[in-house]
Image: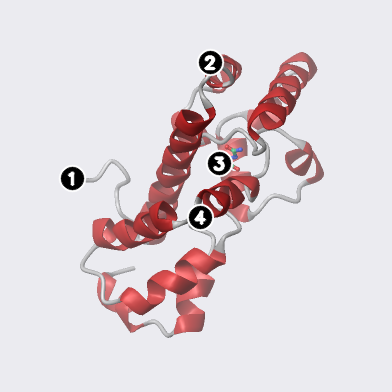
Amino acid sequence: MDMEKVNSMDFGEFVDVFGNVIERCPLIAAAVWSQRPFSDLEDLEKHFFALIDALPQSGQEGILRCHPDLAGRELQRGTLTAESQREQSGAGLTSLGADERLRLAELNAQYRARFGFPFVLAARLTDPAAMPRELARRLHCPPAQELRTALGEVKKIGHLRLADLLCVDPSGP
Ligand SMILES: NC(=O)NC1=NC(=O)NC1=O
């Protein structure tokens, strides 16, 4: 999809296409639409990220709370969004052993109890074997720092999803 097509979309089409760039947060795309035209993927994602950065902490934590757990109930039940399903199964989370899945669930519960939002990381950029270690490491970070780290992962996921939608190589310039 080229930028001319993106810039010509009406509001409904734009939100239909880009509404899940930030997981289950179509409001972000709805707000970004009014800032068209966009010159390229970097320009478009800059507007998505600027909106996230401008949110109050409650809004930023709300974005994280919209994310399904890694290898959690939604993956088991098949109720993930198409993007999350692709990311999580692509990262091998559908073929974890029972003990690995239990370990991740325990760590996810500890993380959520400490921070009040789920552990988020860009599954496509992470070796599944390293996920429990990364979760355990971040579990001990100060809350303010962990919020920044988690939002950074939301942006990585958003970048990959935008690259897919625009058929751009995600490793880009
Ligand atoms: N809690 C999460 O990190 N969830 C996810 N990360 C991804 O890359 N896709 C997800 O659904």
Task: Give the quarter the ligand 1 occupies.
Answer: top right
Q: What residue appears at the point 44 percent right and 31 percent down from the top-left corner? A: 125
Horizontal arrangement in the rendering, residue 171 relative to residue 110 (left or right): left
Q: What residue appears at the point 60 percent right and 51 percent down from the top-left corner? A: 62
Determine whether the beta carbon of the residue marked 2 sits less than 8 angstroms from the nearest atom of ligand 1: no
Instruction: For marks 1 and 3, give the CA distance.
Output: 23 Å
| Label 3: how many Cα within 10 Å (few below 14, some 14–19, many 20+) | many
Q: Position of residue 73 (x, y in %)?
A: 79, 38
Residue at numbered disc 3: 87
Kindly identify the amino acid type of the residue bearing the numbered disc 3.
Answer: Glu
| Mark with earlier residue (1, 3) | 3
* 73 is higher (above) or lower (below) than 24: above
Q: Position of residue 83 (x, y in %)?
A: 57, 51
Horizontal arrangement in the rendering, residue 19 relative to residue 118 (left or right): left
| Mark with earlier residue (4, 1) | 4
Residue at numbered disc 4: 22
Residue at numbered disc 1: 173
Q: What residue appears at the point 48 percent right and 79 percent down from the top-left corner? A: 13
In the rendered structure, are the residues bearing label 4 and label 1 in contact, judged by CB atoms less than 8 Å apart?
Answer: no
| Mark with earlier residue (2, 1) | 2
Quadrant showing the N terminus: bottom left
Instruction: For marks 2 and 3, give the CA distance.
Output: 22 Å
| Label 2: which secondary element | helix
Q: Residue furthest left?
A: 173
